[in-house]
Amino acid sequence: MQDGLRTEALRLFDAAIAAADPAQALARAFAAHPLPAAPGRTILIAIGKAAPRMLAEARAHVTGPVVALAVTHHENDTEVPGAEVLRAGHPVPDAAGARAARRILDLLAGCTERDRVIALISGGGSALVPAPVAPLTLADKAAVNAALLAGGLDITEMNLVRQQLSELKGGGFLRHAAPAPVTAYILSDVIGDDLRVIASGPTVGPVGTAAEAIALLKGRGLWDRMPEAVRTHLETAGPPTPLPEARNHLVGSNRVSLDAMRAAAEDADWQAHIVSDRLTGDVADAAARVLSEMHVPDRPTALLFGGETTVTLRGTGRGGRNQEMALRVALGAPDLAGHWVFLSGGTDGRDGPTDAAGGVVDAGTRARIEETGADPDALLANNDSHAALEAGDALVRIPATGTNVADVQVLLLAPT
C-alpha cells in the first residue's frame, strides 16, 4: 500500500511540474491570448530561468521579421535556434548580467510604433538583468541588495527600493520600448502572483515611489547603510510619470500547478482539496500545519499545499526547505491506523544546495533511517535533512525542470 501511495504522490508532483512547463504554459496562453500582429518587426525578449524554453516556443509562433533574445542563468546551457542567448549571474548579479541588460536596452531603443515587443518573463529575471540608473554602479546595487537582505525586508519591500534604482524594473522596460506596444507573458515564481514583484515588474507599474522607498529605509534603520549615490538619487527623484500601457498575461503559477494536481488526483478517484496555496514562513511552522491535517479519512484523500517556506539555519548540514519539511513531517507524524505518504518538492527540480528536489516520506521513514545507524533527530537539529532522507530512501530526485513556480506538497491519506 505504501509503495502505491508513494507512486501516486510522485505522479501528482509530475502533474504540477507539467502544468508549469514553460513551453506548454506559453502555448496555452497563446491559444487564449494570441500574439498581436505588427506591420514591422517582432522583438522577442525573454528574461529568467525559463527564458530559453519560453523563447523557443514563442519563436515557433512568429512569422515575418523577428529579433529574438533570451537572458538566463549561467547553469542553463539551452540554446535556441535563430536566437541570441545570454547568460548571467543568479542570485547575485554580475557583470555579464549588466552587459545583458545593456543589450536589452539597445534593442528597445531601436523600436518604432510599427514594431511589437513580446516580453517573456519568468523567475530570476530581477538578478539576471541589473541596469542601474546613472550614475549608480553595479557595486552600488549589490550593496543595496545586501543591506535589504540583512534588514529582513520581504520581496515586495525589496522591490519598492530596487525598482527606484533600475532602468528596467518597475515598468522601466515599457518606457524604453515606447512607442512600440508591449505584450508580456509571465510565469510566476511569487506566491500570490503580484505582477509588480515577479522579476521586479519590468512590464508593470512599480510597487511605490521614491519617497515611499526613503520612508521604508528610514523606518527600518537602513537609510544610513545605503551608498551615498543611492541616497542622492532617491532624494532628487522627480514625481512618477504615467507608464505606457502594456498587456500582461499570467501563463503559469503555483496555483495553476496546484489546480493541475487536484485534477490529476480527482481523475484517479481521490477526494482532493487544496488546503493552502500560501504555505509560507518558517518550515517548522509549515510542517506543523501539515501535521494538523493528518487523520484517518473515510475515503482516500489528497490534501494539497503550495508556497515557499524558509529554513532557520542552526547547524552545518545540507538540505533545503522541502527536504526539511518532509523530514519534520516524518518525525512528527502521529501513529495513524490508516496509511499515509507526504511529498514536498521544488518545481524547479532543485532544493537548496543539493541534487534533490525534495523528499517523500511515510510512516516507516524514521525506522528506515535508524536502521542505517543514523539518528534522524540529530540530523534534523543539524539541518542535515539531505543525509537523513538519503538514509531513509526518501529523496525525490528529478532532472532540472527549466521552470520554477515555487514548491508544492501533497499529503495522501487512506483508510486501512
Image: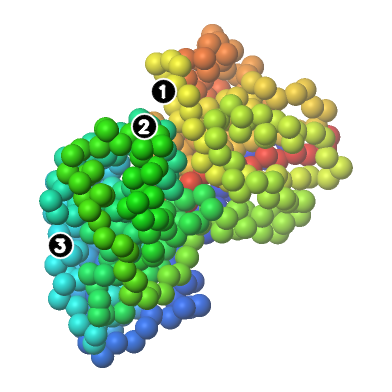
Q: Residue furthest bottom?
A: 39
Q: How is the image coloured?
A: rainbow
Task: Give the CA separation, mark 1 to mark 3.
Answer: 38 Å
* Dot 3 crowding, Cα within 10 Å, few <14, some 14–19, many 20+: some
Q: Amino acid at mark 1?
A: Arg
User: Is there any visible trace of residue 23 in the rendered image?
Assistant: no
- Horizontally, is 286 left or right of 88 in the view? right
**Circle nearer the viewer, 2 or 3:** 2
> Which residue is pictured at 45% across the width and 51% down the height?
189
Camera-side residue of 79 and 236? 236
> Which residue is pictured at 49% across the width and 32% down the height?
310
The residue carrying mark 3 is 103
The residue carrying mark 2 is 221
* Dot 2 crowding, Cα within 10 Å, few <14, some 14–19, many 20+: few
Mark closest to the chain's N terminus, 1 or 3: 3
The residue carrying mark 1 is 318
* Dot 1 crowding, Cα within 10 Å, few <14, some 14–19, many 20+: some
Residue 321 in the image, given as x and y percentages of width and height: 49, 32
Residue 335 in the image, given as x and y percentages of width and height: 77, 22
> Which residue is pictured at 55% across the width and 22% down the height?
392
Task: Give the CA separation, mark 1 to mark 2.
Answer: 33 Å
**Circle nearer the viewer, 1 or 3:** 3
| 149, above or below 120, in the image | above
User: Is there any visible trace of residue 169 in the rendered image?
Assistant: yes
**Circle nearer the viewer, 1 or 2:** 2
Residue 137 in the image, given as x and y percentages of width and height: 14, 46
Q: Amino acid at mark 3?
A: Arg
Camera-side residue of 12 and 272? 272
Q: Amino acid at mark 2?
A: Gly
